[in-house]
Amino acid sequence: MADSFARRPSVPRIIVGISGASGFVYGIRLLQTLRQFGVETHLILSNSAKLTMAYETDAKLSDVVELASRCYRNDDMAACISSGSYRTMGMIVAPCSMKTLAEIAHGNSSSLLARAADVVLKERKRLVLLARETPLNLAHLRNMVAVTEMGAIVAPPVPGLLRAPQKPRRDD
């Protein structure tokens, strides 16, 4: 097919979702890092993500949108990323709220963020969910199992604390 819509992209292309969970800065840092590596990013922000951004950061929406190659409204169900014929490497949702995780786990594609994740799974591409919640209830755990069984990776952002472990000193 000669259509550029279906051809494999010449540069790496990934969908980035930012949902309303605490940890908006994870999405910002992800977009900054992918930009440094020349990755084409397609951004979806949930309405709750915009609220969380205002509470947790000094960032302006326009600055976050500018970090992405392209940005879509979460209600734009006709966006190219809602189709499996639009080729991507996959998708990362950073952070991923339990609401968004539940929508993905149950195939509820009523938002572009959930629909894009559904497409990534059906196309057998990589879906990584930075799930942000604690403590977890049984519904959260079952939804995590469900998305894992579908092929997603649930990767709660846990900072590495053992970077340079030191032996305790004895003060004898």
Image: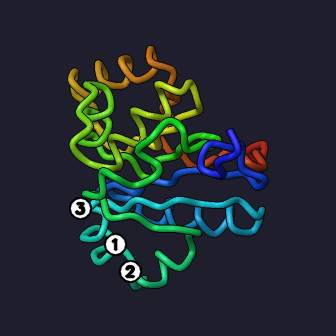
Cβ–Cβ below 8 Å for labels 1 and 2? yes
Residue 24, above or below 163: below
Residue under label 3: 48
Residue 170 in view here: no
Task: Kindly give the residue lying farthest to the front in the view shown.
Answer: 2
Whichever of callouts 2 and 3 sits on the residue coming sooner in the sequence is 3
Question: At label 3, which amino acid type do we have?
Answer: Ser
Label 2 SS: helix
Residue at image point 68% right, 38% down: 1
Residue occupied by mark 1: 53
Could you tell me which residue is drawn at 48 percent across and 27 percent down?
121
Counting residues from the start of the chain, the first of labels 1 and 2 encountered is 1
What is the distance, in whole Å, between disc 2 and disc 3 at their CAs? 13 Å
Horizontal side, residue 103 vs residue 153: left or right = left
- Residue 154 picture location, percent across and down: 48, 32
Q: Which residue is mark 2?
A: 61
What secondary structure is found at the residue carrying circle 3? helix
Amino acid at pointer 2: Leu
